[in-house]
Amino acid sequence: MMYEATGRLLVTPVDKGAPARVRRLRELGLGERAEPGLDAFADRLARVMDAPYAMVNFIDEERQFFAGLHLPDGAPPEPGAPAPGVNAMGGADEADEPGAAVEPFAERHLERDRGYCPHVVVRGKALVLEDVCDYPRFAGNPVVDEFGVRSYLGAPLVDRTGIALGTVCVVDVAPRPWGRTGLDTIKSMAAELVDWIHLREAEGEPGAPL
């Protein structure tokens, strides 16, 4: 485990590979905008895993961006649309009561200290958290209190250069026994998406994930 000088447990890993990842994402034209094909991929991932939330997540030096996103209602937010309970000026809607729960992942951007995908890209391998509260390092992540996250399963998108571009992941607000089958499935789907990224790069034009 990693600690700050104060002795506090670090919830976000040091990411020395971020500059190279950002350059590679720019080469591939990924991580700056939502893509219908990636939303469709996230929808399929959610169905396969029977999960309420699924993401195709690209990570730069300061933030995470869900280029593909599945929410429980099946309708990912439009790019730039305010989150539920937030008006166009960035303030709270009058109808919302103070202290109302924040809709999990209602926006496509997330800071690097939120969630578990930053750990996956630094590790370069899948991460299975059937109940985040069982792991002190992960139980203290802000998404637990802010969004009610209780379980996570993610796999890195490692491209032909060896760089982890981001992740595919699923999240639930209840503990989930993902098991070996879940792990194998998400790793397989991550490999499938990486193959599509390479094909799109070779063809020099955008396409849709299988």
Image: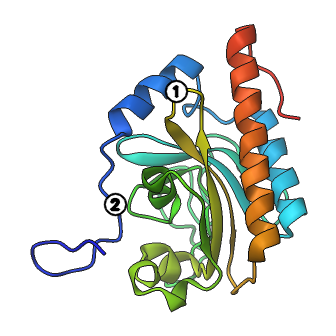
Q: Left of 94 or right of it: where is 43?
A: right
| Quadrant occupied by the C terminus | top right
- Residue at position x 26%, y 71% from top? 2
- Report x, y in % for residue 109: 52, 50
Q: Can residue 70 be seen in this view?
A: no
Mark 2 = which residue?
13
Categorize mark 1 by other alpha carbons within 10 Å: few (<14), some (14-19), many (20+): few
Point out the residue furthest to the top here: 204
Q: In this view, does 85 lie above or below 77?
A: below
Q: Residue at x 38, y 30 (%)?
A: 20
Q: Which amino acid does label 2 sit on?
A: Pro
Q: Which amino acid does label 1 sit on?
A: Thr
Closer to the observer: label 1 or label 2?
A: 1
Please indicate whether residue 44 sits to the left or right of residue 110 in the image.
right
Q: Nearer the viewer, residue 6 or 144?
A: 6
Q: Give how far across and how far down residue 99 sits, in percent.
A: 50, 85
